[in-house]
Amino acid sequence: MAKYKLKKGIGLLEATLYGVGIILGAGIYALIGVGAGIAGNALWMSFLVGAVIAAFTGFSYAELSSMYPKEAAEYVYTKHAFRKEWLSFAIQWVMLFTVGISAATVALGFAGYWSFLFGGKIIVISFALISVMSLINYFGIKESAKYNDISTFIEASGLLAIIILGAYYMGKNELFSSINFLESPNGAFGIFTATTIVYFAFIGFENLVNISEEAKNAHKTIPKALLISLAISTVIYILVSISAVGILGSGALAASKAPIAEAAEKVIPKSSYVMSLIALFATSNTVLILLIVASRLLYGLSSNRMLPQFFSRIGKRGTPFISIFTIALLAGLSILAGNIKKLAHLVDLGIFAVYISINLSVIILRYREPKAKRFFRIPFNIGRFPVMALCGILLNLGMLYFFDMTDFAYGIILVFAGIAAYLLFNIKRLRASKSGKTP
């Protein structure tokens, strides 16, 4: 049987554009106001801290992807490192719920802009969006690079417009130049706490490693593209936060249902309509992508016999319909919280926990599989020990300090639920394995 390999046609430029495309999204449209309410004028520093955390963890993803270029990345990496199937399942379980709750978070952001334009109740609008996007997911979505490029262009255009409007406003308004952008009402604590929310805007950078098999000279191209795309996105985020705070003020930004749109409106009257439409496109598109990803994660766990087989059942439309509507239910229940700040906190808590496991996996595998082929190795090592992976662990652990105890309670409940689900649905196989029989 002939074996085919993916064509290595992606260079540094294409990989960088892909990275920018998956990083830039609805997060900043939905959460810039929430972050401003905590960090104040120093909101840009929260984005900078988030970029540093992402960079350290990005190096770990790059090394692991060069060793195991496979799907269900977190499950594969941690299974090789810890050699505990239940633990790897729990980590992938957390990622599954993180993505599902992310869809609810962005849906609330969409509802804010919709309400700003047309009125309506936030919860009802959010439910409607999840329902419509889930139906589209069910009927089947064939995504293309061209569509992704158009989506990225539209989303980025709104952010670039705010930067330009901020520069224009600064030139005409003396008050803008007098703002102290180092000032935070809650000091450094407020800056780091805001990071636990706005980090949502960086989620997705880790997906860049999934094109390693299609990149030319991947062991050099992917790490470079990852860092360059993070740098570009960080600069855009910082400039947008400075512009929005300078135009509207951190207080008004925090109180707004449509912060980006209202900032544009203050500089150019009636421009909020166009900006809100861009935000609606960005947020709805992101919700659809998140619902697709979450349903496929659930499908993947089921097809690998980690969860009941009916989740991997394919319908007439060629999509895993049970997984799709299960994720829709998860997102819908999450919306009932009605608090975009709380949902974003839960999402980022899950992400930080997963990132800790990824960085730890790199360290363990340096000693457990020292001779394994690595096309890319994290720089700055002491012998085999990767210093940057340790920094990634410490940074992510440090961020946990700024979460509420209730967030940890929800997180612990989720992890134990995952372990219980694993044991419940795999008990026969585990017993058969111990007895040496085939399940």
Image (cartoon, rainbow, N blue to C red):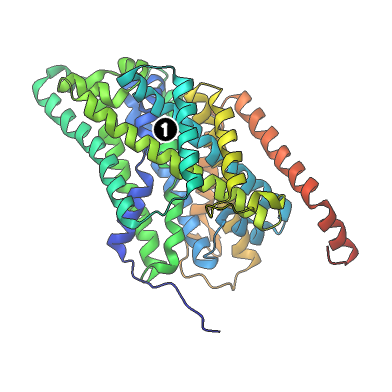
Is residue 400 placed above or below 190 in the rendered structure?
Answer: below
| Amino acid type for the residue under numbered disc 1 | Val
Q: Residue at x 64, y 45 (%)?
A: 93
Q: Residue at x 44, y 45 (%)?
A: 289
Q: Quadrant of the C terminus?
A: bottom right
Q: Position of residue 346 (x, y in %)?
A: 55, 32
Q: Residue at x 67, y 53 (%)?
A: 302
Q: Which residue lies most toward the bottom here?
A: 1
Q: Quadrant of the N terminus?
A: bottom right
43 relative position to 80: left or right: left
Q: Which residue lies most toward the left here?
A: 172
Q: Position of residue 396 (x, y in %)?
A: 53, 41
The residue at which mark 1 appears reads as 198
112 relative position to 163: left or right: right
Q: Which residue lies most toward the right here?
A: 435
Foreground of the two, 50 or 103: 103
Within-10-Å neighbours for mark 1: few <14, some 14–19, many 20+: many
Q: Residue at x 33, y 49 (%)?
A: 21
Q: Secondary structure at mark 1?
A: helix
Is residue 60 placed above or below 129 in the rendered structure?
Answer: below
102 relative position to 433: left or right: left
Would residue 269 be visible to someone looking at this image? yes
Q: Position of residue 206 (x, y in %)?
A: 46, 51
